[in-house]
């Protein structure tokens, strides 16, 4: 059995649907950081069957907005002194800014470098957003 030590301080992103761990790892640019990070994939889970886990040592100030887009069932554990001091859940965000592009090729956010794409959630089941610039609908794709 594989053994991964616990962390003393940092974040554990748990209950990631198997296969989504690498997507989160890439979206958070964790391959480029200078602090210890562990990505565990296909870990046995009684609830999910298999799950992915990401452990981030010593870092707590990470924007987790996009996690709800990738997998709204994720749990975030904040670790201090090797103990979980706080558990957070994520959900599909109501408003998103700059995380993905508008599907409308004529949208100003796709053609103006100063226009940051902004969206408001309109359909939670389909993860469908309305663009604040052109009012077109965009479905978030991994």
Image (tube, rainbow, N blue to C red):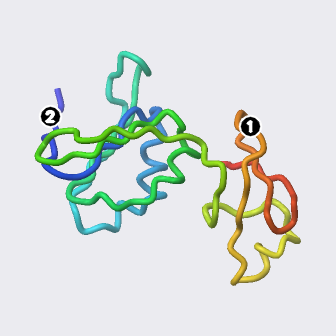
Residue 47 placement: quadrant: top left
Q: Is residue 18 left or right of residue 84?
A: right
* Total marks in image: 2
- The answer, for residue 142, to whether it is visible in the render is no
Q: For residue 85, which numbered disc appears in the image? A: none
Q: What element carries label 2?
A: loop
Q: Which residue is drawn at 22% across and 39% down?
A: 84
Give the class, few, some or many, for how many residues have Cα within 10 Å of label 2's Cα (few <14, many ≥20): few
Give the class, few, some or many, for how many residues have Cα within 10 Å of label 1's Cα (few <14, many ≥20): few
The quarter of the image holding the N terminus is top left
Camera-side residue: 48 or 61?
61
Residue 117 placement: quadrant: bottom right
Q: Which residue is drawn at 23% across and 41% down?
A: 85
- Image coordinates of residue 44 in percent, x first then y, are 33, 23
Name the residue at the top extreme: 46
Q: Please, is residue 91 above or below residue 107 in the view? A: above
| Residue linked to disc 1 | 126
- Image coordinates of residue 123 in percent, x first then y, are 76, 39
Q: Which residue is drawn at 16% across and 46% down?
A: 7
Residue 70 placement: quadrant: top right
Q: Is mark 1 on a helix, strand or loop?
A: loop
- State the separation of the CA atoms marked 2 and 1: 38 Å
| Residue linked to disc 2 | 3
Q: Residue at x 70, y 42 (%)?
A: 127
- Label 2 with label 1: CB-CB less than 8 Å: no
Q: Is residue 74 left or right of residue 57?
A: right
- Image coordinates of residue 82 in percent, x first then y, are 13, 43
């Amino acid at each position: 059995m594989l053994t991964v030590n616990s962390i003393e301080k940092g974040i554990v992103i748990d209950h990631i649907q198997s296969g989504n761990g690498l997507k989160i790892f890439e979206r958070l640019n964790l391959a480029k950081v200078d602090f210890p990070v562990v990505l565990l994939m296909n870990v046995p889970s009684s609830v999910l069957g298999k799950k992915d886990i990401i452990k981030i040592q010593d870092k707590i100030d990470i924007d987790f907005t996009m996690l709800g887009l990738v997998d709204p069932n994720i749990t975030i554990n904040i670790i201090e002194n090797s103990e979980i001091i706080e558990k957070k859940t994520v959900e599909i965000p109501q408003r998103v800014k700059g995380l993905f592009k508008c599907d409308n090729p004529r949208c100003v956010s796709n053609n103006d470098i100063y226009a940051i794409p902004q969206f408001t959630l309109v359909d939670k089941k389909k993860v469908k957003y309305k663009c604040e610039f052109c009012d077109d609908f965009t479905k978030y794709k991994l």
